Image (cartoon, helix red, strand yellow):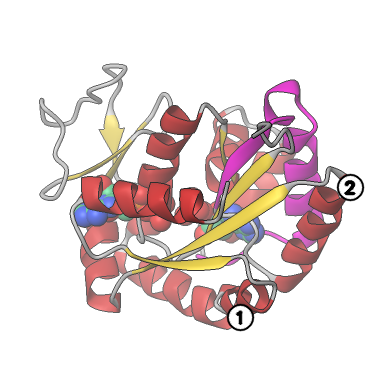
Amino acid sequence: MAQDSRPLFIILLGPPGAGKGTQARRLAERLGLPHISSGDLFREHLKNQTPLGQLAQQYMSKGELVPDEVTIGMIKDRLARPDAQRGAILDGFPRTPAQAQALDALLAERCARVVVPYIRVPEEELIARLSGRLTCRAHGHVFHVRYNPPKQPGVCDYDGSELYQRDDDKPETVRRRIQVYHEQTAPLIDYYRQRCVLVEVNGDAPLDEVTQALLEAVQGRGA
Ligand code: ADP
Ligand code: AMP
């Protein structure tokens, strides 16, 4: 049978702390597609002190969403780059119905295949994951103080850079982010279910098991 040459977009859906970033990196490596994280892109802008980074920071620090127009523009630019022509693993985008509609239009133009794994994790577990998350300064690699500790405390296994706790992983902001998720992002579960592209995956399992379940979900969709 001829190989399907249409681009493949895997949209990882799930609350903050579900494991989207961790799993997106693994899938990107396995499938040879770029990992595109809207949060990482905003943090990169912030590190470089661009006007977009400074604007985004006003929202990120409070656990609110960056306005749709700005976020959609940033992702459109990223998806226009050569490495995303065969597809991508999207992590943290879309997060609102308006973002999902903008993405749909873009992917329809490209005749893309779309799979949307929804990573389900109980709320108490999310709080434990976010409050122990460690992030690397150089490239955003993610660890956890207990669940996925680095080999050497405070140092990234992959690039040797410093690990830090994200400001928005502090308890008050974590609570607000989970609330914002329920209000603005959770409606996308039904949005994608109605389009028959949603696959539920249990995210409350060891890292390797979740990766395996995601790969099966993607393959099960013929992707
Ligand atoms: P998200 O991108 O969805 O916000 P992350 O991938 O950053 O989530 O994961 C949040 C935290 O939970 C990180 O510290 C990560 O190491 C940890 N984590 C991710 N998946 C699991 C898992 N299956 N079991 C235990 N801890 C996990
Ligand atoms: P994340 O790295 O996915 O946890 O995102 C961190 C923060 O970046 C969020 O709490 C938002 O403030 C902002 N952000 C990331 N992605 C989006 C998005 N798709 N829409 C709006 N804001 C976003």
Q: Position of residue 153 (x, y in %)?
A: 11, 31
* Quadrant of the image occupied by residue 160: top left
State yes or no: Cβ of the residue under disc 1 lies below 8 Å from any atom of ligand 2.
no
Q: CA distance from mark 1 to mark 2?
A: 23 Å
Q: Nearer the viewer, residue 71 or 173?
A: 71
Sequence-earlier tag: 1 or 2: 2
- Within 8 Å of ligand 2, the CB of disc 2? no
Report whether 215 appears left or right of 142: right
148 left or right, relative to 184:
left
Q: Image check: 34 left or right of 102?
A: left
Q: Which residue is painted at 14% across and 50% down in the image? A: 147
Specify the quadrant that holds the N terminus: top right
Tags 1 and 2 touching, CB below 8 Å = no
Q: Is residue 85 shown left or right of residue 166?
A: right
Q: Is residue 120 above or below residue 41?
A: below
Q: Is residue 75 part of the magenta span, yes or no?
A: yes
Q: Secondary structure at mark 2?
A: helix
Dot 1: few (<14), some (14–19), or many (≥20) neighbours within 10 Å?
Answer: few
> Where's residue 75, x and y in %?
73, 44
Q: Nearer the viewer, residue 106 or 213?
A: 213
| Quarter of the displayed picture in which ligand 2 can be seen | bottom right
Residue 167 shows in the view: no
Amino acid type, mark 1: Asp
- The tag on residue 190 is 1
Residue segment shown in magenta: 63-91
State the residue at coordinates (41%, 24%).
138
Q: What numbered label is drawn on residue 109?
A: 2
Give x and y (percent) for residue 96.
68, 69
